[in-house]
Every structure is written in C-alpha cells, then in structure tokens.
Image: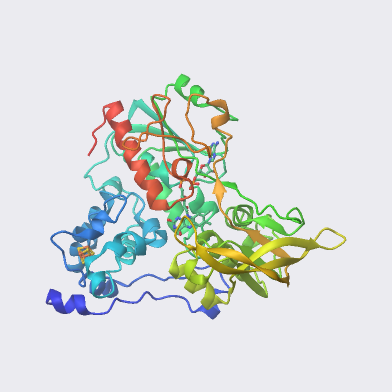
Amino acid sequence: MPRRTASAAPRVPMPAQPAAERVRNFEEVALGYTFDMAVAEARRCLQCKRPQCVRGCPVEVPIPAFIAHLAAGDVAAAYRAVKTANSLPAICGRVCPQETQCEGACILGRKAEPVAIGRLERFVADQYVHVDACDLLTGARDCVPVDPSRRVACIGSGPASLTVAGYLSSRGARVTVFEALHEVGGVLVYGIPEFRLPKDRIVAKEVRALGTQQVEFVTNRVGGKTFSIRDLFEQGFSAVFIGVGAGLPRFLGIPGENLNGVFTANEYLTRVNLGRAYDFPNHDTPVILGRNVTVYGAGNVAMDAARTALRLGAASVSVVYRRTVADMPARREEIEHAREEGVIMQTLAAPLAFSGDERFALRSVTLQEMELGEPDASGRRRPVPVAGRTRELETDLAIIAVGTRANPLLLASEPDIAVDGRGYIVVDEATGETSMPGVYAGGDIVTGAATVIQAMGAGRRAARAIARRLGCPVE
Ligand code: FAD
Ligand code: SF4
C-alpha cells in the first residue's frame, strides 16, 4: 500500500465492551486489536526521518522500527524492538498517557489523528505475554548468567523497581525485590482496577517473566520496620534502589471525614483490587458497597474509584470537582469511559462537610457551588465560592481522591538520605543516586505522584548507573 494513502486512512478504532454490558463486570474494557487491525494501523505510520514520537517516550522505545516490523507482519521482530527499551510493554500499552507523550508528539497528528502507538504496543506485547523465555524478554539471544557476587536490592515492587530488576538481571546482576504488601506490582496491582489492567493475565505474567531471570521477590517485608537499608548492605548487597512510591493519602480536612462510609481512594481501591473485595465472599475482604456514591477529585484515581463503585452495584456515582470537565486532570479516554458508563460529573462544586446519622454512618455531603475566577499560578482559572450557594447531596459512600504524598516510614530511620521539604527523596537527575552512596531512588518517591512510564524511565536511568557501578554491561 503506498505510504501516503495509508497514512491518510482514519485511525483504526479500538474494539471495546459496550458500556451497558461492561458496567456489570470487571472484565477489561478495551478489547485490543486483531492482527489485521494492527497491521492496518501500523501502515498509517509515515516512518519519519526525524521521528518526534521517540522523543515523546520517556523510555525511548524505537517506535518507527517496531511499527515498521508490524506493518510488514513480523510481530516477533516488533516485539524484540519494543523490548530493547521497555520491559513492561503490555502494561504501558494499556495505561500510559500516550496522548501527551509519543502520540502527542507524532508528526502525523499535525494533520490527522496520530498513529495509535499505545494500541500497537499493547497488540505486540499481548502476542508474547505467555512467553517467559529470556531472549524474548530482553531482545538478547541468551540469558546472561547471573553473578551472585553482584547483588542489588530493590525496596518496593512498583514499575520503577520492576524496571531496575529487569534491566540489571538481564545484565547478570542478582536482584532481590522487597515488598511490604503480599503481592508484587505496586499500584499496578493495588491501584489500577482489573477492568483497565488485568492482574493475573498481564501484571502477574510480566512479573513471572522477571522470575525467569532469577529475580527474587520477598513479600511482606516493610523497609524501615522489618529491615533497614544498612541491614541490606550488611547482608552483602552492593547497591540498593528505593522505589516505594508515594502512597500516603491526603484528606479533605472537612468535618465528618471520620464517619463510617468515608474512604480514601487508596484504601477503597486496595480493598477492591488487592483484597479482591469485588469477589466477596469468595475473597473475605469486606467493602462498603454504597448506593449513592460520591468521589472527590478528578484525576485517573478518581475515575477508577467511580467506575469501580458502579461495577459494585451503586445506583448513582458522582464525581465532585471544583473546576469543569475540561480542566479535569484524568486522561480524556478515562473521563469518556466513565461518562458512557453513567458517572455523573458534579462540576464547579466543593465539599464543605459530611453529615451522618446517630450510628455515625455517612448520609449526606454539603456542597459549595463554585465559579471560575482569575487565572492562578498554574495558568488555570481559580475556582472561587459563589456566596450563599450551597446544596445537600445524599451519599452513603464517599471516596476521597485528592492525591497522595511520601510515606516517611522508610526514611525516618535513614537520616543520611536527603529529602526535600515535602519528604520526596533528592537524587542526582542523571543517575538517580541519593545522598547515601550506593543508594538510588526513582519513581513517585522522587517526583511525587506521576505516571507508570515516568517511574520506569527513572528506574532505567538508575539501573544504568548501578550497572556501571557493578561492572555489568550497560547497553
Ligand atoms: P508504586 O507503584 O507506588 O509502588 C511502590 C511499592 O512500594 C508498593 O507496592 C508499596 O507497597 C511498596 N512499599 C511502600 N513502602 C514500602 C516499604 N517501606 N517497604 C517495602 N515496600 C514498600 N499512571 C499511569 O501512567 N497511567 C494510569 O492510568 C495510572 N492510573 C493510576 C490509577 C491509580 C488508582 C493510581 C493510584 C495511580 C495511577 N497511576 C497511573 C500512577 C502510577 O501508577 C504511579 O505513578 C506508578 O505506579 C509509580 O510507580 P513506583 O514504582 O514509583 O511506585
Ligand atoms: Fe510514525 Fe508518528 Fe513516529 Fe512519524 S512521529 S515515525 S508518523 S509514529
């Protein structure tokens, strides 16, 4: 097919479960391309001489190269190309905000819809998600033998640490990952819901694949409580990577926040996802189901909580936000999916107080009506209260999703690791090394709440620096 004609073709749509159907189950919403769809979409790529898409990718996936292989129908070669830069492509293809990264920079996007790079990455990765062989994991022909004298510890098992583990183990280091919870994966397992990122089919497979590179996972170990960083050096680890995320929830600070029925999104999603509360009583984690659910905040976390509550049978779910839908920080796709499923957007509204009954159960919330005033420091118009305009909204489950912060648990016992005023670890940007020699950090514990791919990018930078320190091959 001539390239010009192909690129002028419209973007191949992603098949999805119909909204009325998916709102009653936890199955994945987006169903993925078929081979023919993937090849047709790959053929829209212009194969630019100076491809901007790669610059938009925090881990620099060789995007034109993998798409060219796919356009030629060679999925195995496409997979190898992706894997040279991205150790978790089935995950990134699903949850990365491509519209502000690779696809946002795609040259085709200047005149038409950008190439659906994320969907293509997902397609390629899904064809190999069942394969744990080392050469397919790393793009290298054979697994590098692991050298037990080159020992690296990762604390936390989110995407930052998994990237460090994948990179270093494929270059011969012996990596051990210590995780506080009973499952490995960080937010990928306890935060992002099953209907966006299947846990057993995708996350567990990617983690198991790391096991073939002899990465050891030690769960139920809390850094700062059951072990310290100094203990790890005494046990013979040569370098330590801290990837503990920023999972300490923020609250609204309004009256009634301690009523039964008020949750942080963190606790609510952890119960439902990690504790499998959606499968009660087969799994014995209880959760309040809620008839009239309200969610506070408008990021991806808020959309995930709202859509989860709908799937658990709520009669109504409202997202309460002090600005407008256009200002919401969540991905457009998540906002659209939430609205299709019936989530109500209560915009230009801010919570003032929760009220309960005589048994301390949540019954309603008082909302302050807002309007947009002058732009603030972020350039966005500042929401200001409309005098005298409040209203009462019935709610028996309130989920607070207004952000998270650094958990001081690990660092309280490590005064040699410098943190900034908000408790995030200060690192050398090029290497990820902290103020304690041999200790590196990356992901949300350095940047504050960010994205999966940014955590992976930080993991990759730190892993390279650790590889140099240990004398492992770097590229
Ligand atoms: P995390 O994923 O937070 O993992 C940290 C791990 O460290 C956790 O498992 C934790 O239990 C463990 N830990 C913490 N303290 C200790 C300790 N002391 N000892 C041992 N282990 C410890 N990003 C996107 O790109 N796309 C999305 O669609 C998206 N949706 C999201 C939805 C939700 C609900 C949430 C909460 C976040 C979402 N994000 C999304 C953000 C993204 O998941 C995070 O930016 C990313 O996971 C950060 O990775 P990390 O490796 O730094 O830490
Ligand atoms: Fe293809 Fe877009 Fe990258 Fe150009 S910028 S190579 S069109 S994906």
* Residue at x-position 26% and y-position 53%: 61
Quarter in which the C terminus is drawn = top left
Residue 467's x, y, as percent? 29, 32
- 281 or 255, nearer to the observer: 255
Against 460, residue 293 (above or below) is below
Residue found at the very far top of the displayed protein: 234
Q: In the rendered image, is residue 169 in sight? A: no
For residue 295, side relative to residue 2 (left or right): right
* Residue at x-position 41% and y-position 44%: 160
Quadrant location of ligand 2? bottom left
- 346 or 147, nearer to the observer: 346
Against 340, residue 469 (above or below) is above
Against 10, residue 319 (above or below) is above
For residue 303, side relative to residue 151 (left or right): right
Quarter in which the N terminus is drawn = bottom left
For residue 456, side relative to residue 257 (left or right): left
